[in-house]
Amino acid sequence: MAVERLAAQATARPAARRNARHWPLLLAAVTAILAVAAPFVLPTYQTELVILFLMNLVLVVSYRLITTTGDWGLAHVVMMGAGGYSAALMAKGLDLPVWLTVPLAGFVAAAVAGLISVPLLRTRAFGYFIASFALGELLRLFWIRLDVPFGGIRGIINIPEGELFGHSLFETIPYYFFALFVAFVCVGIMYLLDRSRLGMTWKALYSDPALAECVGIDVTHYRRTAFMIGSGFAGVAGAMLAHRMGAIDPKNFDLITMLYLIIWVVVGGTQSFWGAAVGLIAMTFVFELTRPLLEWRPLIFGVVLIFFLIFVPGGIESLVGRVRGWIGLLKRGAS
């Protein structure tokens, strides 16, 4: 009987591996079908929520990319604003089309990140956290104080929505597919970066920066690279937001928005690529469910953050490993 059981287990393992490979492809196919069908099935308000979710998806995944080096900062939303302001100025002042302003806004945000990284990367840990907040607020202060060209405290209004292939992006469905395409490209690039040699180097810096430096890795260079690339993608998200809203002001990129971003990442987790996205999905549902409790929302979000920091420090993604472990123990007990 024991020999037969071992033979059955040996036969079942290749089949289990094949099924495990097929699951991601099946999930991706189902997600693609739902994404394409969504604007034709959902009401306009919910479609707008999905558009906002796609922007936030690019934002949260790009922030998670930076955290793989161990750098948790408070300037990422301001880098999103740099992209938003640059897209608005290019669209209004230079009359550039939206398909050009969005990628250019990413490059502008990356360039701004490169400038502020010079003093910022001289710090680490808590010092980096505080310095990033100070530099981000300095940039936001420029937007508030300078009426020309940033519009001061009122910001920039009447930003052109643009059009693609003869379709006005003022309409919900065309802009939805535009946002879906941009999010797909951005997240796909970041996924490839995360799996690349560059991504492995970033993670090595987080694991043991001293050892990485000893083996010849230029720690400052790779930290700057992660910060600039992540900020560039945040700038793309900011450009998408500016074109969709038709207006932009410094309040869109304040500390409260940054704290929401940190909560998304903490709730989801940073060990896997999709952890931050899972956190965004979970907290988007919480955000909508608490809409009637507007005054209580900061308290609710604070409780959620403290709960995950104490009881689930690895985020939702860590629960998957725990569940698999419990299932394995149950199977061993049954056998």
Image: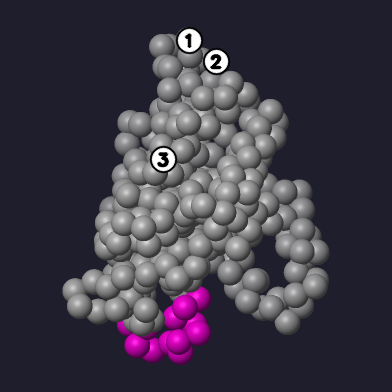
Magenta segment = 30-49
**Sequence order check, earlier mark of 3 and 2:** 3
In the picture of the structure, the residue carrying the numbered disc 1 is 214
Q: Tell me the tag on residue 178.
A: none
Instruction: Name the dominant secondary structure of the magenta segment.
Output: helix
- Furthest-front residue in this view: 148
Tell me what residue is drawn at x 38 percent, y 51 percent.
105
CA gap, disc 3 and disc 2: 27 Å
User: In the rendered view, does 223 fall on the left or right side of 293?
Assistant: left
Image spot of residue 127 (x, y percent): 69, 28
CA gap, disc 1 and disc 3: 28 Å
Q: Report the front residue among 314 and 253.
A: 253
Tell me what residue is drawn at x 36 percent, y 82 percent.
171
Image spot of residue 155 (x, y percent): 56, 61
Q: Identify the amino acid type marked 2.
A: Ala
Q: In this rendering, which labeled residue sits more in front, label 3 or label 2?
A: 3
Q: Quadrant of residue 55?
A: bottom left
Residue 47 sits inside the magenta stretch? yes
In the picture of the structure, the residue carrying the numbered disc 2 is 210
Q: Identify the amino acid type marked 1.
A: Cys
Q: Report the front residue among 266 and 151.
A: 151
Q: Quadrant of residue 151?
A: bottom right
Q: Are marks 2 and 1 in contact (CB under 8 Å)?
A: yes
Q: Circle 3 — which element?
A: helix
Tell me what residue is drawn at x 52 percent, y 52 percent.
148
Instruction: Estimate how packed mark 1 is, as few (under 14), some (14 to 19) or many (20 or more) residues with alpha carbons within 10 Å.
Output: few
In the picture of the structure, the residue carrying the numbered disc 3 is 110
Image spot of residue 329 (x, y percent): 58, 53
